[in-house]
Every structure is written in structure tokens, then in C-alpha cells.
Amino acid sequence: MKLTWQLDLPRGSNITQLINYELVNLLSGLLESVRLKKPLMPSSMLQVAEGLALPGAKHLPTTYTAPISTPTIPEVELSHGSIPIIDLEALHGPRRSNIVKQLGHACQHQGFFAVKNHGIPKRTVNGIFDTTREFFHLPVEERMKFHTPDPNSEIRLMTAYKDEVENLFIARESLKFHCHPVENYVNKWPTNPTSFRKKAAEYLTNVRRVELTLLDAISESLGLERDYIEKRLGGHYVSLNYYRACEQSDLVTTLGVRGHTDPTVITILLQDDVPGLQVLSEGKWMDVNPIPDTVVVHVGDLLQAISNYRYKSLLHQAVVNSDKERMSIASYCYPSSDAMIGPPKELIDNNNPAVYKDFTYGEFYKQMWKVITPTDKRLDSFKISAP
Ligand SMILES: O=C(O)CCC(=O)C(=O)O
Ligand SMILES: [Fe+2]
């Protein structure tokens, strides 16, 4: 078997730096998944989305200890744009068409929006945060039981790591797992803390309902049948993200998650009350500070393709702070492997030629492996005309 790999090297990097333990782990994980003939699952995609966040080695640091010489986080100018807010409850009432228009406008012009009146009970939201916090406060040996080099594992702990190429410390720890339908996966989830399965299942069932309501409205906003996207859906995947507070002096070289787009249709992000999420808006990073009782929705790469580039996937990152730990719960939905992702004929005409050819999610998934830059370049090989 011949395995080829395309690397987009950041300027100034050299190959020796790249052949570090993360890359070795990536390759070993890939070979392992080929050997096991595992079905297509997006856990590995999400590592790609985070660049070389591929900790498979036991020696990886879970806290920041190594000194980093040359800080490379660019000076960023923060923008102060506003966050569109969509009222989910109103989607079920007489104002539906108006709300669908608002939603389409937000997807087209901002690539993200907040959702209020989503119907997820407050105790459910508190429940998932409480159990996530308890999990990440467990001793490291307990958490590491979920650490595996197999990128297709149904559950996987990703640890913090040092990016040798860019001289950055990526401080996030996250527990990622499949969750739809819940009963197929729940037996793989942690039993410590004891509340974990119950609280996670409760939140994930609720968030799936929100996701389906939004996807119906998003299909409608594109002039497609309401169930156009839902019919193509496969599973659901979640990342419980935990960002420890870091030393003030380390802030300049430490990121929570570096800039990336999500390889999903949409991502539903629940943030706790600690700021950290930033989105790229008109060329500047903009803080998306938590708004109580809302969730944030991001346009992902696959919606960019389905919408024939009308909606653009959102470039976002998370920063850390020195005062407080931070948590976020990211829910990703992905299509079934034979689902056609290329733009539907309803969105193609003389003024709007197809930007992407027809391709399946399975083909996209394979492409994911070849592109490790955290940008929308993953879709480039499916492009047939300039947008
Ligand atoms: O924690 C955040 O605010 C962002 C998380 C994120 O982008 C992700 O998990 O894909
Ligand atoms: Fe993300």
C-alpha cells in the first residue's frame, strides 16, 4: 500500500521540526485505522481542524512546563462587531419566515449567530458543565484512561500540547465522543464522575433537537426542502473542552485552540460564563463573549459547500486567561458517508455557477486527512469555479 501525504508548511518552518512526535502519532493512528478498517468518523477530522493536535504519546505534557523561546502569537486587533441573536421559539410561530430570513442573513454575512429561547433547560446546561468540570478535575491517570492513539476511537481524550513549529502552547484538554443515537455510544462514556452519563445524555438529546430545528430553518433559508440537510445527516459528535487558567506570563505564547474552521455542517457551541471564543470578522478577531442562556452556532465547511459558497465556514479560535478555568461544549453534526454534499441544483444558475463539484461526505473525509492547515482549504480539491 502506498500512503501519500500533503503538508502545507507554514512559512519559515522546516521539515525536521515537523517530524515530531505529533506527526508520528498521526501516521501511526492513521495506519491503525486502516488496519482496523474502521468506519468513517470525524474524530480525526477534528484533530486536523486543530492542526497537529494529535497527542498519542504518553510523554505529552498535560500542563505547561517547557519554556517557549520566541513568542509567535501575532498582535491582533480586536473588532467590536455585534452578535446576531436568533429566537428559536419564534421559528415555531407566525414569525417563522422572518426568523428564517434573519438566520440566512447571519449565515451569509457573519457565519455565526447566537440562539436564545432554545428550550434546553438551565438545569441541563448546569448539569453538563458540572459533570465536565468534575471530569477534568479528576487525577490525570483517571482522565488518561480515555487517551488513545487511535483517531477513530469512539471516545478520545486530547491533551494540551506544544506546537514546536509555531512555538505555541495549545492549552486545551478535551474529551471527544460520538453521541447519536445515545444508546449506541453511552456504554463507552466515563462512569467517573458517576453523574457523567446521565447528564451528558440529557444535554446531548436536547442539543440534537436544537440542531434539527436549526438545520430545517437553514435549508429553508437556502430555498431548499426543509428536510434537505436533515435527510443527509449521519451522526453527532461532541467535544467537551476544558481550558485551565494559565500563568499571566505565559499568556502571550498560549492559546486555547488556534484559528480553525469546523469540518461540520453546523457546530453548536455552549460556553460557560468565561470569555474566550473569538471569531474572525472583517479581518479582525472579535470576542464572542458569553450571553446568558444562549448557544452559539457556527457555519461549518460542509454547509459552505451545500450552500454553494453562499454561507462561509467560520474561522474561530479560543484564548485562555489567567483568572479562571473555562469550559465549552461543542456539538458537531456530520453527514452519512454516502450523502451528496456538492451544491444542489436549486442553488446553481447562470449568475451562480457551481463552486464545488458533486462529492460525498466520504470523499470529503478522505480529503481531510491530506490537509492539515486549519482553514477552509479542505474544500479546495472539490472546487470547480472561483466563487
Ligand atoms: O471553546 C471554544 O470557544 C471553541 C471551541 C471550538 O472551536 C471547537 O471545539 O471546535
Ligand atoms: Fe471549532
Image (spheres, grey):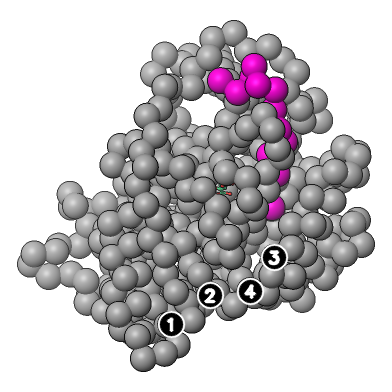
The answer to the question of whether label 1 and label 4 lie on touching residues, with beta carbons closer than 8 A, is: no
**Tag shown at residue 125:** 3
* Residue type at the position of mark 1: Ala
**Tag shown at residue 334:** none
The magenta stretch is 239-252
Of circles 4 and 2, the one toward us is 2
Q: Label 4, on which residue?
A: 120
The answer to the question of whether label 2 and label 1 lie on touching residues, with beta carbons closer than 8 A, is: yes
Q: Label 2, on which residue?
A: 117
Dot 2 or dot 1: first in sequence order is 1
**Tag shown at residue 90:** 1
The answer to the question of whether label 4 and label 3 lie on touching residues, with beta carbons closer than 8 A, is: yes
Residue at left 56%, top 35%?
319
Marks 4 and 2, how far apart in space? 8 Å
* Residue type at the position of mark 4: Ile
The crowding category of the residue bearing disc 2, from other C-alpha atoms within 10 Å (few below 14, some 14 to 19, many at least 20), is some
- Name the secondary structure under disc 3: helix
* Residue type at the position of mark 3: Val
Q: Is residue 202 above or below residue 385?
A: below
Residue 127 relative to residue 104: left or right = right
